[in-house]
Image (cartoon, rainbow, N blue to C red):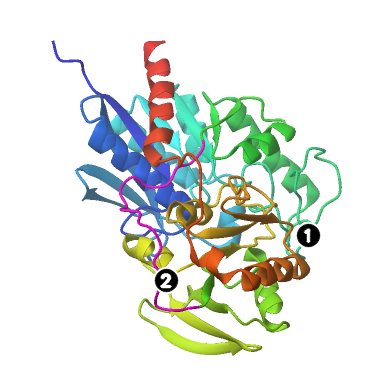
Amino acid sequence: MIKPKKKIAFVNIFYPPKTLGGATRIVVDEVSTLANQYSDDFELVVFTADTESSGKYKLTVYPYDGYRVYALAVALTVSTNWHEKDEEVAVLFDNFLAFEQPDLVHFHCIQALTGSIVEVTQKRGIPHFITVHDAWWISDHQFLMDQLGRVYPDGHPDPFEPFTLREGVTLEQSLKRRVYLKGLLSASNGVLAVSETFRQIYAKNGVTNVVTNKNGISDQVAWAEKNTCYSEKVICAHIGSMSPHKGFDLFKAAVQTHKFSNIEILVVDHTKEQGYLSQSQWGNTNVTIVGRVNQENIQDLYRRIDVLFAPSICLESFGLVTREAAACGCWVVGSDVGAIGEDITPENGFRISPTTENLQVVLHEIDRAPKKYKGLSKSGHIRYSSDQVQELVDMFNAIFVN
């Protein structure tokens, strides 16, 4: 007798053909791995947002990789990104649940879709997990950094401790939002943090049912060792956005104000189209600036890099770039804020407090030992998406057994 498949619905703010951010890449890998390796056990369906449609609350359905994707048109603005409820979205998502009748729902990033979709899932009594990729659920500031640049490394363990409110938001509104969203978390079958660092932050903020389901790098990509023989110098790269919260200004200042003999810089400007190329100089150091790179070609970018710099000053919940770069034998310089530097060891790089001074120290170390840093770094066990998915399957099956 053939065992009936369990249907799992996945929810994330973005989904192909629109892929934006590391969280979306994690979700796509998760669904792809389940589709490829567990097709006898699970039927899959996806619910996402269409943030570019002019018709608000319009629902479209399209096939992707053998399963259905529902895309709901919602506006993604500073305001909607913060709001915890949307009754129109709730009605439409409830209709989706009634039609598809999933056995389990796995929520990922739901800003703009709001917590209302979790609430209707709970009202229907459908088992569900919530993966937290950032601090949206526990803070007004999604990445725990306010508009003045202040970082809240522990979130807000004391809900009444003063912090900078968002423009146009009162303390009462902020408290009401956090209480509502934390209530949804506590009523779920489990809150899954993508790193141990973020599990600890959520636990400090009163989320008692949080466990670690650590991200892994994609099994779908042919990761290959770096090859930077095109230059005798050490290629130091910053490939995150050219914004202060990613530490770009600190990195540029560290390079610009000192002289280096054995270093070149590679920067990815995500505002430029793929194929864009320009040359510049920071102080006496040559700089190559390229446009954004499609995820299908990300391994080719890492192969051009000797040392990846990721000196974020905001709290990254994970940081795929540091893990992916290390898998290609790149050295990594990562921030000790958040989880982006969690897997860095002396054998594969430097974990530092993100300051210009600390970056200068590292740059001079690299400049003094070009042969070492042109060579390959050494990393221990590399965690892949399939490792993460195996843990998820065990959690899903535990629900179905009960």
Is residue 195 toward the left or the right of residue 35 in the image?
right
Q: Is residue 99 or residue 106 the one in the foreground?
A: 106
Q: Main secondary structure of the magenta part?
A: loop
Residue drawn at point x = 37 percent, y = 19 percent? 397
| Foreground label between 2 and 1 | 2
Q: What amino acid type is highlighted by mark number 1?
A: Arg
Q: Is residue 199 or residue 64 the one in the foreground?
A: 199
Task: Measuring from the top left, give residue 180's x and y in whole percent.
Answer: 65, 36
Q: Is residue 159 above or below residue 398?
A: below
Residue drawn at point x = 72 percent, y = 61 percent? 354
Residue 6 occupies quadrant = top left
Identify the element where label 2 is drawn: loop
Label 2 vs 1, first from the N-terminus: 1
Q: Write down the residue under mark 2.
A: 228
Q: In this view, does 296 lie above or below 115?
A: below
Is residue 375 toward the left or the right of residue 255 in the image?
left
Instruction: Give the numbered dot on residue 150.
Output: 1
Magenta residues (range): 214-232
In the rendered view of the protein, which quadrant contains the C terminus?
top left
Q: Is residue 274 above or below residue 381?
A: below
Residue 138 at least partly seen:
yes
Is residue 9 toward the left or the right of residue 191 in the image?
left
Q: What amino acid type is highlighted by mark number 2?
A: Thr
Q: Is residue 362 or residue 337 the one in the foreground?
A: 362
Task: Measuring from the top left, give residue 99's x and y in whole percent.
Answer: 28, 33
